[in-house]
Image: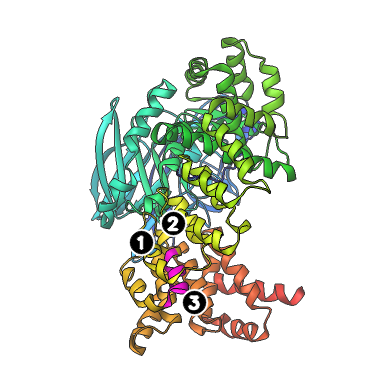
Amino acid sequence: MKKLLIFLVLSCFSFSAKAQSQIDFLSAKATLQFDFEKQSVFGSVSYKIKVLKPMDTLKIDAKSMQFSDVLLNKKVAVFQSSKKALLLPGTFKPGTYHLQFNYSATPRQALYFTNINNQQQIFSQGQGKYTSHWFPSPDDQRDKLTFDVSFICESGKTVISNGALKSKTNVAGKTQWNYGFKKPISAYLFAVAVGDFAKIDVPAINKTKRELYVKSSETHLAESTYQHHSEIFTFLERKIGLPYPWEIYRQVPLEDFLYAGMENNTCTFFAQDYVTDAVGAHDKPYANVHAHELAHHWFGNLVTAENPEDHWLYEAFATYYALLAERELFGDTYFSFALLESARDIAAFHKKKPEAVVSTGASSLTYYQKGAWCLFYLNRLLGDETFDKIVNAYLKTYAYKTATTANFLDLVKKNSKIDVLNFEKNWLRNPNFDTAEALNTLKKFSPDIRQYLETSAIVNGKDISTEALRNVYKSSNISEIRREVLLQADKLNETDRYELIKLGIVDIDWENRQLALALTDSIAKGDCALFAKTLADSSYVTREIALKKLYLYCPEQRMAYLDALKDQNGLHDYNVRIFWLTLALKSKSGSSEMQLKYYDELLRYAGEDQPTERRQNAFTALFFLDASDKATLRLLPTGLSNHRWQFVKFCRDKIRELLQQEKYRLFFESELPNYSPRVSAELKRLLEEKKTN
């Protein structure tokens, strides 16, 4: 049984009632270029704007940009450029205006320039940070407009953006990519990616053209990465009852992308980590992210939330429909246990911080998982036919517009006889989570859940015998029940515990094999061969754990185990290779020349040209081997200037830990002049922070 993976994207929106009531951006046309060395963007932009009420200042959101050649209705305009916006003072009567300007920006967020293993990429991430950091545009997501944008880039690079690729032309030795689409979208969904990509065209579904991208060097991974694409696409169209509402759909993996995925209109961006072979697909399955971002093309892109408290209309629907897609792929048992795990997570979180689904500023868990639970509960109240009919009506009624929670509930009220007010009060607006009612609903839906909960109560009992645990394990065809039994291993004596773990080692479910390995604290000499079979398991994480356990408990055959995995990298973070290098260095395996080669390789993985998850993995290994290694210490602060906050936090926390010792303080102080101004400033801040604490 596969474990549910809910992948979250940070969502943060700007709503401006005043702006929304006074002005309407209708269309944007632009020609843009990038300067990779300066990490900047520049170009010309033309807007068609409708003023709805008299106003004295025309405003367009633009963070820290430079403007020139500003024209309003083809006449030179007086303008001001603040750190937040382009402002045109004047007297503006209701009517249509044409605004033109040139601009340039060196954004610190929302547009990112990466160079991983000498492969340059540029990509945007408008949601959460706003497109207006790199492209002058309205932050108000309720203001929808069309985009026709051309990008001029060096030849040999692929440029991917929203809508149809209308043409490609040569411009002064470069290539101009001309994109555009007819339907209006919120500006946070406008996006661009530039890099060395290969395109895989797949047959159209309902006339929708589909393009799947991978790096040019990784076309062999496309099949395993996108293995469920057509099934997910077909299922969502059928379940929603409304064809995919846009003319094309693309998926683009990006190095060091900030989140798991982002539903940019017609072109989903997602993290490169999910591009993997068939083994890695168990550890990093793309199906949930894939379905979630595709579902957003109806829930969010087609129908947009009117107010901040309506944010669940995006994330709850996308999360629930992604679960429904996984149910189609993996079955009812998978779906049911995903909901059970989600309910447990919600219950644990809400004991500390109760939050209503319909609210402003709630956590991702509340909007995504609790919101999805509300929809599952509503689905069970209404039945599938009525639920599908209401969702379909909601999407058709508010297509290319904005909607509120009240709008959705009005359709529920109109098309059913359930107590809508009670549902809204107890599920949507209740900061608490009714765990008992949730579990009762799930038990009615799933006989597997009923059996699991009943068995779980037994195996967690104080008086259950070892023999009874083994019998439950051997007789159950539900892998979650067998997993629950494995978790009781620490209650048993050493002999019985070991026998139970051996059952787990040969389980048909890879997650149970992985858990059994994790619980292993000894391996009998005669069982080394049995445990060694997991070195070829259908999971790179399992293989990594297996190598660790076999290395510890079967020392006579260490070299054979190392040899078995010597040519494997594992996941995108190189989990297997980095652990292999760690063991080889720790055991001083090989000649001194080979030891130096292993060290250089491990240090290289911590370098600035590597993906951040790989860097973090390598740093962890290097500090384990030698916390005082100067080469490692010099590299660590370079992570402080990275755009991924997760990696920055790792580096910052590690430096703070080291600064508790004076020798490391003196080392970092001596290295300050050797870093870039940005890294030096961040490191100096940490040094000063230590002094004041």
Secondary structure category for the residue under label 3: helix
> x, y percentage for residue 443?
58, 29
| Distance from the alpha carbon under mark 1 to that under mark 3 | 29 Å
Quadrant in which the C terminus appears = bottom right
Secondary structure category for the residue under label 2: helix
> x, y percentage for residue 439?
63, 32
Q: Give the range drawn in magenta.
A: 546-555
Q: Which residue is drawn at 71% across and 75% down?
A: 690
Secondary structure category for the residue under label 1: helix
Estimate how packed mark 2 is, as few (under 14), some (14 to 19) or many (20 or more) residues with alpha carbons within 10 Å: many
**Is the Cβ of the residue at disc 3 closer than 8 Å to that at disc 2?**
no
Q: Name the residue under label 2.
A: 505
Q: 353 or 462: which is nearer to us?
A: 462
> x, y percentage for residue 326?
43, 35
Q: Name the residue under label 1.
A: 533
Residue found at the far right of this picture? 693
Q: In the rendered image of this protein, does residue 169 appear above or below residue 94?
A: below
Q: Earlier in the sequence, mark 3 or mark 2?
A: 2
Q: Name the residue under label 3.
A: 622
Q: Nearer the viewer, mark 3 or mark 2?
A: 2
- Which amino acid type is marked by label 1? Lys
Left or right: 380 in relation to 298: right
| Distance from the alpha carbon under mark 2 to that under mark 1 | 9 Å
